[in-house]
Image (spheres, coloured by chain):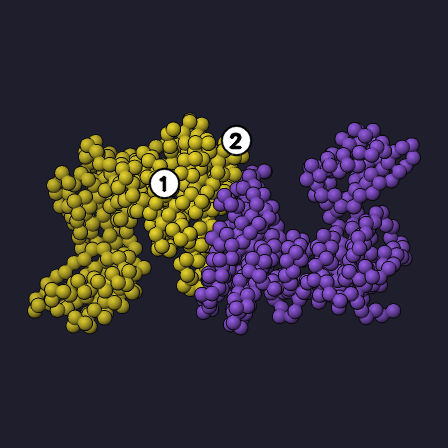
Chain colours: A purple, B yellow
C-alpha cells in the first residue's frame, strides 16, 4: 500500500468550495489505490480571529490556554474535510492530535514534535479510510494540548511522513512553488523545479516564507521529498530533495530578501576578550535572535560592535544595548530600521568561485552601498539600505538568474 | 473545602465584557474560600455558525464529525474564561472533557454522561485553582468525542455536581429564574422562588425552555439543588429542589405552553386489539415522540385515533399515518398545525381536588374549546386552537396564579 501525505494550508480550506476542491484532490489519489493521509491547517483568518479574542481578554494570556484555544481552528478544519469527503462517497475519519498520539515537548505555543504513534493511523488506512489530521497541534506526555507555532502545520505533515515511512509529502499552498525571487517584485522570477534541502533552508532562513524552516530541517534529516505545489492549479510545483548531480549546473538557485530587519551598533567599547561573549549572551538571554554580527577595531583599544535583529526585537535589543554600552564604557548606541537583507543562494557556489565578487560588482554598478556581509558555502547575504532592495534583487536576478536576457 | 459549581450559558459568554463579568462572579466565590468549578457553553452564536459551516458541506453530515466540530465551541470558551480569571489575579485552569474524563455513551450528537472522573478536578481544586470545564461535550471509553445535544451544558454541570458530591449547582442564564408563565406573554407572570423537581420536569416537558429536561432529572435523582439565576443581575433566582412541606401551599406553580405542536387523526379504522400497539410502534420506529393520544369508538366496530407530535415531525408522521390508514382500512387522515398545548402544573393539585374542573371552567368562560386533555397527578394539559393560547394562559394565570388580583 503506497502512502501519500498531503498538507493543505488555511487558504486552501477557506470556505465550503475550497474544502470541496481539497476533497476532490484527496479522493483522486485514493481512487488511484493509494492510502491517503491529509494534514490541514485552520481555515484562513480563524487563528487571527481567535488570537484577537484572547487579546481582548488579556494582554499577556497564558500560553497553555492560548494553545487550548488555537487547537480548535484545526479541529474544525479536519471535521469539515471529513464531511466533504464522506459526502462525495469515500470514507474519511478525522482525529485530533491527542487521539492518534502526536506527542510534543512541553513548550507551549512553540512546541516540537517528539513522536507520532502510527498505529491508529495505519489501522484506519488499512480499513480503506482517508485519515485527516490537524497540523500545528500536539499533546504532551501529560495530555496537555500544545501548538507548534505559526507555520507548524508543514512540520506536522513532515513528521507524519517520517512516522509512516513516506517517501514524499505534498504541501499544497496558494503559490505555484518556490520562486527564484519574489515574483511580486522581480518580473522575471521563475518557479524552481528542484531545490536541495540546504538551499531551501537558506531560502527559508533568508526570508522566503513559502515553507516553514523546521519542516525543511525535518525532511532533510529523514530524506523525505517535499512537493510544494498549488491547491488551485494542477501543475507540478517545486520538489525539495537531497542534493543531486543534476542540480549542480546552476550557479545560484534564487535570491531572497527580508525587509523586516534592524541594525544596532554599540560604539567605542573596551576591547576585552570576553566582551563579545557577554554581549551576545545577554541578547540571547532575552530570546532575541541575532543575524549578522560585525566587529571593528577603531584604535585606542576600542571596538565598535554591530548586529542585525528581527524588526520586532528592535526595541528590546536597543534597551539591552544601552546597558551594555554603560557596562563597557562605550560612547553611543545607534539603531537603524531602514535596512534590508538580500541573500543569494545556491549549491553551485561551492564549485563556482567568484560568485560573491559577481554579486558585489552587480550592486556596485547600481550604486548600492553594502553595509554588512555574511557568507556561507551556499549563501551570500548583504545588508543594504531598505530603499535599494528592489533595485538590488532585480539587478542580481537579471544578471545571474534570467534565462532569456535581452542584452 | 466547600465546592461550588457554576454553569454559564452562551449569552453569558458572548463577548470579552461578558466573559469578564463571569470571571468576576467566579472570583468572588473563590475569595470567599470556596473551591469553584465553572462549566461553560460555547459563546452565543458559535454553535449555529459551526452548524452552518457543516450544512454548506453536507446535507447529512456524519454525527461523529459534527461532534468533533461542535466540541470546539466550548473549548474556546473555557480557555477565554481561564485567561480572564488569570488576568484578574486568580489561578484558573481549563480542561476539555477528554482530559478530566467526562465519559459518555457512544450516541453521537445526543450522548449521555455515564461517569466523570473527579480525581484530576479535585487535584486542581486542592492546589487552589479554579477549574473550568466545557459543558455539552464528552468522550467515549474509546476516546471518541461526543456531544450531549442542545442544552446539554446544564446536564454537564449537574453531572459534575454529582461526581463531586456538591449540594447545589448554580445555573447562570439570561433570565431571572423560572416564571409562573412566559413573562413575554403574561403580564403578571412572576418569578418562582422555589419549585420541586417534579414540577420543574413537567414545566420543562410542557415547553418552558429555561432548563434542560435531562439536567433536572439528574439533579432529582441525586438530590442536588439547582439554583437558576441571571448572570446579569445579583438577585436570587429560582431554587429547584426536593418537594417540601412549605411548597404545598400553592395550588398550582405555573402555566406553560407549547405552540410547536401538531395533531394528526386517522379516521374510522378497524377496532382490533393490536392496532394501537402497531400504530405507535411504527411511529416510535421513526423516532417520533408522541404526546397526547386519544381514541374514540365511532360505532360499526370502528375507531378514530388522534395524537400530538412536535411540529418538526409533522410531515413524517403524516406520511406514516397514510400508510397506517390503508393497512387498517381507515377512511381519512387529517393533520392540523394550528394547535397549542397549554399545561397547568403544580404539586398542590395532589391535595387540592377540582383543579382540572377550575381550569376547564376558566377556559369555557373565555369561549375556548378544549380539543384534547391529558392529566397527571401534577399536570393538566389541554390542546386548544393556536389562536386562543394567549387568552388561555392569561386567563388561567389571572384566576389561579395572580397574587394581587384587582377583581
Q: Which residue is mark 1?
A: B160
Q: Residue at x 22, y 43 (%)?
A: B345
Q: Secondary structure at mark 2?
A: loop
Position of residue B96 relative to residue A253, above or below, is above
Q: Residue furthest left?
A: B300
Q: Chain of mark 2?
A: B
Q: In 3D space, how far apart are the residues under numbered discs 2 and 1 (Cα atoms)?
A: 25 Å
User: Which numbered disc covers residue B89?
Assistant: 2
| Residue B326 image position (x, y, % from top left) | 20, 72
| Residue B399 image position (x, y, % from top left) | 20, 41
Q: Residue at x 73, y 58 (%)?
A: A199
Q: Residue at x 38, y 42 (%)?
A: B117
Observer-nearest of B41 and A295: A295
Observer-nearest of B215 and A63: A63
Could one spot residue B335 in this view of the protein?
Answer: no
Horizontal arrangement in the rendering, residue B16 relative to residue B325 (left or right): right
Q: Which numbered mark, 2 or 1, is in the foreground of this view?
A: 1
| Residue A227 image position (x, y, % from top left) | 64, 64
Q: Residue at x 28, y 60 (%)?
A: B287
Q: Quadrant of residue A249?
A: bottom right
Amino acid at each position: 500500500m503506497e502512502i501519500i501525505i498531503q498538507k493543505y494550508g488555511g487558504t486552501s480550506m477557506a470556505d465550503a468550495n475550497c474544502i470541496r476542491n481539497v476533497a476532490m484532490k484527496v479522493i483522486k489519489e485514493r481512487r488511484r489505490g493509494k492510502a491517503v493521509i491529509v494534514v490541514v491547517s485552520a481555515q484562513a483568518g480563524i487563528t487571527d480571529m481567535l488570537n484577537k479574542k484572547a487579546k481582548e481578554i488579556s494582554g499577556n494570556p497564558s500560553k497553555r490556554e492560548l494553545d487550548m484555544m488555537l487547537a480548535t481552528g484545526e479541529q474544525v478544519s479536519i471535521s469539515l474535510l471529513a464531511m466533504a469527503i464522506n459526502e462525495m462517497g469515500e470514507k474519511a475519519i478525522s482525529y485530533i492530535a491527542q487521539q492518534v498520539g502526536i506527542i510534543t515537548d512541553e513548550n507551549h505555543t512553540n512546541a516540537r514534535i517528539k513522536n507520532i504513534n502510527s498505529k491508529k493511523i495505519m489501522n484506519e488506512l488499512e480499513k480503506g479510510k482517508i485519515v485527516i489530521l490537524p497540523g500545528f497541534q500536539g499533546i504532551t506526555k501529560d495530555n496537555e494540548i500544545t501548538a507548534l507555532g505559526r507555520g507548524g502545520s508543514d512540520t506536522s505533515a513532515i513528521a507524519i511522513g517520517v512516522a509512516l515511512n513516506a517517501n514524499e509529502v505534498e504541501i499544497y499552498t496558494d503559490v505555484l512553488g518556490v520562486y527564484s525571487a519574489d515574483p511580486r517584485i522581480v518580473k522575471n522570477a521563475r518557479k524552481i523545479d528542484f531545490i536541495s534541502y540546504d538551499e531551501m533552508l537558506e531560502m527559508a532562513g533568508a526570508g522566503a516564507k513559502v515553507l516553514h524552516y523546521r519542516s525543511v530541517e525535518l525532511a532533510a534529516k529523514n530524506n523525505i521529498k517535499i512537493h510544494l505545489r498549488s491547491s488551485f492549479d494542477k501543475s507540478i510545483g517545486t520538489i525539495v530533495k537531497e542534493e543531486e548531480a543534476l542540480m549542480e549546473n546552476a550557479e545560484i538557485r534564487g535570491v531572497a530578501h527580508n525587509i523586516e530587519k534592524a541594525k544596532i551598533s554599540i560604539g567605542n567599547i573596551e576591547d576585552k576578550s570576553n566582551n563579545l561573549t557577554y554581549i551576545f549572551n545577554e541578547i540571547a538571554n532575552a530570546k532575541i535572535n541575532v543575524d549578522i554580527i560585525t566587529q571593528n577595531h577603531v584604535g585606542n583599544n576600542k571596538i565598535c560592535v554591530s548586529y542585525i535583529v528581527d524588526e520586532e526585537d528592535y526595541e528590546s535589543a536597543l534597551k539591552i544595548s544601552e546597558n551594555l554600552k554603560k557596562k563597557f564604557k562605550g560612547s553611543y548606541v545607534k539603531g537603524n530600521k531602514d535596512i534590508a537583507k538580500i541573500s543569494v543562494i545556491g549549491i553551485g557556489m561551492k564549485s563556482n568561485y567568484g560568485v560573491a565578487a559577481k554579486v558585489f560588482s552587480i550592486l556596485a554598478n547600481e550604486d548600492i552601498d553594502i553595509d554588512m556581509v555574511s557568507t556561507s558555502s551556499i549563501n551570500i547575504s548583504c545588508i543594504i539600505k531598505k530603499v535599494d532592495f528592489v533595485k538590488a534583487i532585480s539587478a542580481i536576478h537579471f544578471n545571474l538568474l534570467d534565462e532569456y536576457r535581452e542584452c
